[in-house]
Image (tube, grey):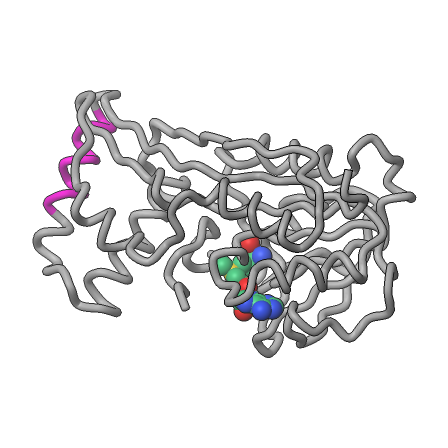
Amino acid sequence: MPHHRTLAPPEQRDGRTPVIHAELRRHYDSLYDLMLNGRAARDARPVLDVGTGDGLALTAITQGTPLHGLGIDVAAPGQWLGPPGWSVIQADAQRLPFVDDGFNSALMVDVYEWLRHPAATLSEIARVTDGPILIVQTDWEGLWFQADEAEIGRDLVRAFTKGAPEQLRQRIRSSAEEAGLSVERSSTVSITTDRLEQGGLAWDVLESIRRYLVIESAQVRARRFDDWRSELQRAADEGQFTMLVRRIVALLGSNGG
Ligand SMILES: C[S@@+](CC[C@H](N)C(=O)[O-])C[C@H]1O[C@@H](n2cnc3c(N)ncnc32)[C@H](O)[C@@H]1O
């Protein structure tokens, strides 16, 4: 399981307060609008958040809104950084312990790449949802670090993203269709940042890469990683740095239309 890949901050800074990267706030706002899909918030709830984890993406999308609902995750619940008042149940998305059409929206952020049977899972989510299903998956193929107008560290990035699904947008579309769902909207969202500062998105993605490649899998020597990072930092200090990451966003409907 690709535990190491996530756009969430690698560690919650004080262990309790949810951290939402500034670079992703507009993206999360647009995900909220998409999930409502023109409905009033009261008609979009209750919401099912599939693979909720610590609830961080759920917080980022629903914070300050009147949405409520329930999160499920196959892993045992740990620390909860999701919105207050939401329940969390341990369950596999492929066999949900809910009646048909009990939710008015469903959400699934950065879980698609973990699914062993994506079409069967989407079909099960559709069974319990009378409304749109919003799928968001970071497309790790599109992770890119640039210094002085050239990509650098491609081999390190590839080692980190190895095993991520290719042709992700097409895959999501195919599994939705196999599940008998319509793809109402599908887009590729590009998120870029030119900042490399502690607490920023690029900093935290680099932390995740370092932790996985240098500490957990020991594929790369610390010195090599740190040289790359220093080069990126120098470029950032000179205003010559960019990190790009893509996310696939798909809104699925169950009317087959
Ligand atoms: C990368 S985390 C994303 C967590 C959260 N959605 C977020 O974006 O902050 C992926 C989560 O999916 C969960 N997961 C993977 N397969 C699952 C399944 N079949 N049913 C339910 N949860 C699953 C994992 O346990 C993990 O917590």
Q: Is residue 80 left or right of residue 67?
A: left
Total tally of numbered discs in the picture: 0
Q: Which residues are magenta?
A: 227-237
**Residue 92 among magenta residues:** no
**Along the line of sight, which residue is nearer the eye, 190 or 185?**
185
Relative height, residue 135 to residue 242 (above, below):
below
**Percent from the top left, x then y, of residue 113?**
47, 57
Q: Is residue 14 left or right of residue 252?
A: left
Identify the residue at horizontal 17%, vertical 31% (top origin): 234
Identify the residue at horizontal 48%, vertical 63% (top origin): 114
Q: Which corner quadrant of the image does residue 61 belong to?
A: top right
Q: Which corner quadrant of the image does residue 208 belong to?
A: bottom left
Q: Is residue 158 left or right of residue 10?
A: left
**Percent from the top left, x then y, of residue 3?**
41, 65
**Percent from the top left, x then y, of residue 12?**
48, 58
Relative height, residue 31 to residue 123 (above, below):
above
Residue 17: tell me if it is visible: no
**Percent from the top left, x then y, of residue 34?**
71, 35
Quadrant including the C terminus: top right
**Along the line of sight, which residue is nearer the eye, 55 or 37?**
37
Quadrant including the N terminus: bottom left
User: On the rendering, which quadrant does ligand 1 occupy?
Assistant: bottom right
Per the picture, the main secondary structure of the magenta-coloured stretch is helix
Identify the residue at horizontal 81%, vertical 56% (top origin): 129
Identify the residue at horizontal 68%, vertical 68% (top origin): 72
Relative height, residue 61 to residue 209 (above, below):
above
